[in-house]
Image (spheres, rainbow, N blue to C red):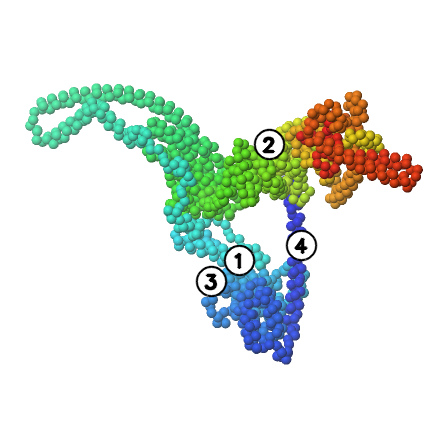
Amino acid sequence: MDHHEDESRGGSVTPRKQDDEEAVARLEEMKKSIEAKVALRQSNLNPERPDSGFLRTLDSSIKRNTAVIKKLKQINEEQKEGLMEELRNVNLSKFVSEAVTSICDAKLRTSDIQAAVQICSLLHQRYKDFSPSLVQGLLKVFFPGKSGEDLDVDKNSKAMKKRSSLKLLLELYFVGVTEDSSIFINIIKDLTSIENLKDRDTTQTNLTLLASFARQGRVFLGLPLSGQETQEEFLKGLSITTDQKKIFRKAFHTYYDVVAELLKSEHASLRQMEHENAKMLNAKGELSDDNVSSYEKLRKSYDQLYRNVSSLAEALDMQPPVMPEDGHTTRVTSGEDASSPAAGKDTSLLEALWDDEDTRAFYECLPDLRAFVPAVLLGEAEPKANEHSAKTQDQPSELAPESDQGQPTQDMAEVSAESGPLQEGKSTEKGKDKEEKDKEKVKDSEKEKGKEKDAERKGENEKEKLKSLEGTNLDALLQRLPGCVSRDLIDQLTVDFCYLNSKSSRKKLVRALFNVPRTSLELLPYYSRMVATLSTCMKDVSSMLLQLLEEEFNFLINKKDQMNIETKIRNIRFIGELCKFRIAPASTVFSCLKACLDDFTHHNIDVACNLLETCGRFLYRTPETTVRMANMLEILMRLKNVKNLDPRHSTLVENAYYLCKPPERSARVSKVRPPLYQYIRKLLFSDLDKSSIEHVLRQLRKLPWSECEAYLLKCFMKVHKGKYGQIHLIASLTAGLSRYHDEFAVAVVDEVLEEIRLGLELNDYGMQQRRIAHMRFLGELYNYEHVDSSVIFETLYWILMFGHDTPEQDVLDPPEDCFRIRMVITLLDTCGHYFDRGSSKRKLNRFLMHFQRYILSKGLLPLDVEFDLQDLFAELRPNMIRYSSIEEVNAALIELEENEQTVSTDKFNSEKHSDTDKPLCRTTSSTISANGQSILNGNEENGSHEDIGGSDTDSGSGTIDQDGHDEEELDDENHDGGVDTEDEDDDGDGPASEEEDEVHVRQKVAEVDPLEVASFEQELRAVMQESMEQRRQELRGRPALNMVIPMNLFEGSAKDHHGRAVGGESGDEDEEAGGNKDVQVKVLVKRGNKQQTKQLYIPRDCSLVQSTKQKEAAEFEEKQDIKRLVLEYNDREEEENNGLGTQTLNWMTGGTSRVTGRGSTWEGSSGRGTGSRYRHHHHSGSGLHGRRR
């Protein structure tokens, strides 16, 4: 929170200053404008009109005057000066009325008013009858009936003409061209007439004119003015009485009250029409074209009236009218929005109902149960009929006695009833026999009924056993329901249920489907598919489930509590899924949606959005419901704009709306690349891998580089679009191509560094993957020896410090942003393991301490970043201390800097001490050089910073590097191994010490004023340059002697003891020693303060030995020539100065030493080596000095 507050405070300083400056500038402009108006008003009130004699001298020709009058119809700011100059040169005294007509007919814009005012002022000051004619001409615009103008003129142009004329009249009054303020009273009375309210267009025009007059002529209404002090002098000259101000105020306020009432009545009419349209939509699903057009017309009229009334209220310093809200009113869409889906799209042009073929198959391709299940198991009516027919066939003996026994008794009763009167004379014996027979039959039937009851009891027991078995199977089947998360599983479960079909089973199934867990929303599509499949044969399943869902929805929506949101979402999503299977009718979905929109608050917003996300797209793409769904979506968006929703609900509504009705956008056009470019992309992004890298390199070399070098560079920089694990292959390709195309390889490095810089400047979240890839690429370029370690360390420090101590620091590197830490980790993970020796090791140690300080400044880090840091330190510096506070890091850095400064001071003192041993060294060198057996290595004598000359040995240069390059280049080029490099690890006097001192000085002075830092660095460079130049001159003036070989290194040879100053013998002595093919060389190294030697054997025919012999011979000849010249010079001196032989002899001895020194130093153009015995040799990055025995 503090960060955001600071950011807002820091960011608001500059805008405030700019606003203050703009306000001052506006005030100055207003003062100048008012001063100009005051001066123009004085000129117009007291015009000095020329006499008739002067006017006769001007051009009064008809042709010239007609041309000028025509130009008055096109007044603008650009032509003002030229037109005024022409008006001064012509005599318009006879053409004043024509000039007035032209000015009145001119189509003036707002920017042209001031130009017209100045032209009118010029004509007013020259012609007396101009201003009355002009005022009358401008008034005709407002009273067309009196002027007899054509009433059929376009209404828009007429309104614009009135507006410009009113503005011009006001400005003319302000500058004194007319002094009659009563003309404005007549205009305002006409504009505020109640009769004009009958015509809506006239009312809109009058409102804009009145608002314009109120803003421009606030003085007429007595309203306060901005910049009151600057306008006091100007307002004193305006003759507006208090009564006139009262008239203006009364007219404006009365008219405002009338139009406010008109606005409210129109708002009520609009609400009434919206209610009617909503009812019609709910009943029919769409609106007629007449209703849509009338609503649209009324809506536009109301919006325009509301804008104009609000503008007038603002000009009068009043509050705009507030319209009463109707919380239950939902507006319907207009003709274009509502009818566009139906009218603008034919059924053939409608979008596809489903997004893909799999979705369509899931919702439309249902399994046919009749193909898998016997017909007897399907439905409710079929099993009953089948059972009835089976019973009649299986049990004829049981059913027949009942029918036989019933039918004869009825027949006999009927017959006896009919034939009773006819058979009265029959005997009664026959009747008795029949009665006995009937009694016997009844007894038989009672026995048979007893048998039937026993059989039924047995059947019921069997059915109960079957029911219990079926119940067990049904429970097991229902337990499988939650696991059916695929189309095949739910279809198989549906078929299995058909074998357990019964009314009770269906009820249990519906209850199980209805009680789906409220968090298992993923099951709803599969449950709905099961219901849709069963509904083809069992209609009651879908109806029972739908009834339960509707009852639950109504209960939850009417409860109006903010509880059970998950249950509400499950309920509405279930209804939506059933709608997509066409089980739930669209009217049910729309009624649910309308209930939510009518009370669009809290959970109802979530329910409506979930319903739209589930089936909104389906209903919008279905031709029968497109129009109604489009209307509902527009209602949703209007409610979202009207309601003050929280961000979560606002996002929910937008997502639901655009999911149903995606914004129209053009199809994406794929890039058309030339075949050559396509082939390059195929090589780099498809074919490149470890096995094919050589093939890719060959193919890239074969390309026409003049045509595709730029595109190759572009593709190489898109490493973030390829695989992260193949970045090292791109770096390998760069290193391989650098042998053949140097400029391309350099351009790759430049582009990588530029991309890193760009990422730091923008700090865009969307570029993070790209920035990480470029850091990896830079590290791989170092691994392939394509960049030096100086580039790596400069980039590392750059990442830590870029943008700090600047106003944009909180934007470029916010306190909570840890992405720069990720960048450093990526770079060091890639190439940091090579910084384990020499100066690079010390540089990395120092950087990691600065890095720890940067990490601690970020506060608490995310866990993933902290784990990455732990892995980084464990890999690179497992023994380094991880500090826990910034104070500890600062103390450690100060201690490190003091140690480095102490080391550099001690080294400087040791160098000075070695300079005091010059005479002894010269004597020894002279003795050895006289025998032609020795040469000194001046490079070793120079101390730490002179040792850097060895970095250029491979290129054939043995001189001290005049550009000041240090040993770091040598160490970077050979970072992956070498001979005896570890001996140099702890060399406290190594070449990096002074370089680190420079870094120490910059770091220490970083907190001081930048100007002081710059001046200090400039003076420091001058002192260092002067010191280096002085040391070089000293080297040329004396023999170079650096490291004296200890006596204990010679093994008793007298000859060896003689050569202890340099520790070597000439090639001639090697030949005398036995003619070995190898030459023994001792490498003298310094470990701490101890000197050590190591032996090497070099072949005699090696170029090093041969070139040494040649150099020795050439130097020997040079020394002989110098010796001869010196002797001749001494002879002449003896002849001229007798008695000075001793002095000459001493001088020759000193000269010999100097000659030896000259022959012993390294020359800049001496190729591999210039000494007669000692060579500077480079062994795989060791940078050591060698000699041979």
Which quarter of the image is occupied by the C terminus?
A: top right
Q: Residue at x 54, y 32 (%)?
A: 690
Rendering coords of residue 593 (x, y %): 44, 42
Q: Residue furthest right?
A: 1139
Q: Is 770 placed left or right of 389 in the picture?
A: right
- Label 4 sits on residue: 21
Near-viewer residue (416 or 987): 987
- Label 1 sits on residue: 309
Q: Residue furthest left?
A: 425
Tell me which amino acid carries mark 2. Answer: Asp
Element type where label 2 sits in the image:
helix
Q: Are marks 3 and 2 in contact (CB under 8 Å)?
A: no
Rendering coords of residue 365 (x, y %): 36, 36
Eye-nearest disc, 4 or 1: 4
Q: Is 1033 placed left or right of 950 in the picture?
A: right
Near-viewer residue (1110 or 1182): 1110
**Sooner in the amino-acid sequence: mark 1 or mark 3:** 3
Q: Are marks 2 and 4 in contact (CB under 8 Å)?
A: no
Residue 934 appears in which quarter of the rendering? top right
- Label 3 sits on residue: 199
Element type where label 3 sits in the image:
loop
Gap between marks 3 and 2 measured at Cα: 72 Å
**Sooner in the amino-acid sequence: mark 3 or mark 2:** 3
Eye-nearest disc, 3 or 2: 2
